[in-house]
Amino acid sequence: MNDVMIEAQNLVKRYDGFTAIDNVSMKVRRGEVLGFLGPNGAGKSTTMKILTCFASPTEGTAKVNGFDITTHSLEVRASLGYLPESTALYTDMLVLEYLQFAAEMRGLSGSDIKKRLKAVVDETGLGDVIAKNIRALSKGYKQRVGLAQALIHEPPILILDEPMSGLDPNQAVEIRDLIKDIGRERTVILSTHNLAEVQIACNRVLIISKGRIVADDTPEGLRDRAGKAHYSVTLQKPTVHQGDDSFAKQAEAALKSLPGVEAARLLEDEAGELTYEIVPRGNDDLRPVLFKAAVDKGYTLLGLKREGQNLEEVFRDLTTGPAATPTNTKAAA
Amino acid sequence: MQRTLTIAKREFRGYFNSPAAYIVICLFLLMMGFFFWNPFFLINRASVRNMYDLMAILLLPTAPALTMGLLAEEKRQGTIEILLTMPVRDAEVILGKYLAAFGLLAVLLGLTLAYPISVSTLGNLDWGPVWAGYLALLLEGGAMLALGVLASSWTDNQLIAFFTSGMICFIFWVVSRFLPFIPQQAASIVEWLSFDYHFQDIVRGVVDSRHIIYFLTVIGFSLALAFRSLESRRWS
């Protein structure tokens, strides 16, 4: 069985004179939750519109669930659920009517509709508003109706355009957790410009800038990209040595001498806690080494943390740096 | 086909989910009532002959009002994005929307049957021409709705769709009244293209297949153009 659910090859979309996306290629495998990241106007929505057959590419092709987007558009659309950026729903319908409509449009019939309606209503927590007019719903609930609509036919692929934008933090967390759940069994592409969401919800990140893909990596990989991770170790100061600096120095020297450690220095000495910053030599995870060393020396370990570079910085580098400005396109920012 | 009906059902119900359909129906019936009964007793005949002309005129603003939002509103709201990413053909979308509007037209015309029925209680009404008149109205109204769907596919502004289709329908309707001013050779073609030429013939009881084919062609052609217009979004 082929595990590649979405495969795009050199997609180009030009609106007279303006290149919205330029040579976008990607592969998304079954079970991946792919975060599609980029500043506004970078081409996220355009790419999604092409994959959902709402727009046609100027050049290039893509396969979704094994079907070509131009020659087998109906099959492509049958295999995916889509939540567009606008989450525009028919505001003159009740939630139940709308979901019924979606189910019928998806070709479900009779008893299947009832079963699936119940399932998506449970899944998206719409039980309380099922008999309400869509017009009267809050943004968060509208978003859920949009998700329910996309899930009603149990599609193997979900494409969600900014599913968490415009929500308050609580709603955003709920929707994010929901997407995480959904992503266990399905392939999900979600676009966002919120980096925290990507770190939590996605297991792969694609960064697009000015119509081009500038990075394709795991969230951890992206962080490691700009700078090495470093560690912070907090040890308890033994009471017997109170008021005496020799323990701090001893520990520092011990940490420095560990294999894979480039440098160690004391950051803080406060309330009986000593915090050290450790800079590693390679990319291996040093946490096991640090823990064992502490145990061997009889130190009381209070904290051990691996700190990566902030994703925000990587994002800024990639989308504003030289890599973000392809020379052969004049796409306006 | 199933999806066409699903869309038609949704749109038809949508008409009654807002006051719009009620307002249109009420206005239509009120104006009908006024203009129908006003000269009725002057003529003093149990005939509904002039009712069809009256209804054809009233349909000129009514049909565009029924169709203006069908696609324009979907585009303005963005709901079209979910609709067209469902596994449905563009043609099924157009046809479903058209069927909904046609259904409402049928309801509207059905309500006006009150007139021939009440007239038949006043005197001896010949029902044959009545059915011919209603067939003519369904055909001409159907053509107007198809032009309306086409106009609605061109824009995301309901008002523009309303006036565009209103204007096109008006031209199709009025052009037969300007025949004396049109050069002889062109006049017969223009006459044949006008709604009224075919409409009047059917109302007179000449239910010729040519007239039916004329209206069906206008409907088919308009819907095909609407389909092209909807499809073109993929490339723009």
Image: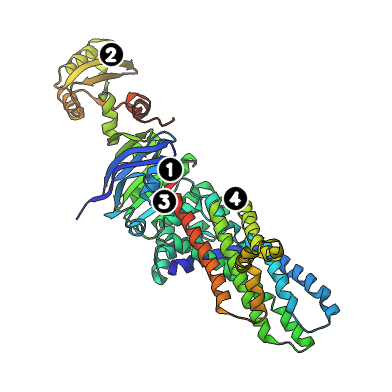
Which label number is shown at residue B157?
A: 4
Residue closest to the far right: B42
Task: Indicate the chain on which mark 4 is placed.
Answer: B
* Separation of residues labelled 2 and 3 (CA atoms): 70 Å
N-term mark: 2 or 3: 3
Regarding mark 3 in the picture, which secondary structure is present there? loop
Q: Nearer the viewer, residue A111 or A300?
A: A111
Q: Nearer the viewer, mark 2 or mark 1?
A: 1
N-term mark: 2 or 1: 1
Task: Indicate the chain on which mark 3 is placed.
Answer: A
Q: Are marks 2 and 3 on the same chain?
A: yes
Q: Position of residue B96 (x, y in %)?
A: 50, 65
Residue at position x 70%, y 74% in the image: B52
Which label number is shown at residue A242?
A: 2
* Separation of residues labelled 2 and 4 (CA atoms): 78 Å
Q: Nearer the viewer, mark 2 or mark 4?
A: 4
Task: Indicate the chain on which mark 1 is placed.
Answer: A
- Residue where numbered disc 1 is placed: A162
* Separation of residues labelled 2 and 1 (CA atoms): 54 Å
Relative placement, left or right, of A14 versus A280 is right
Relative placement, left or right, of A150 versus A136 is left
Q: Nearer the viewer, mark 1 or mark 3?
A: 3
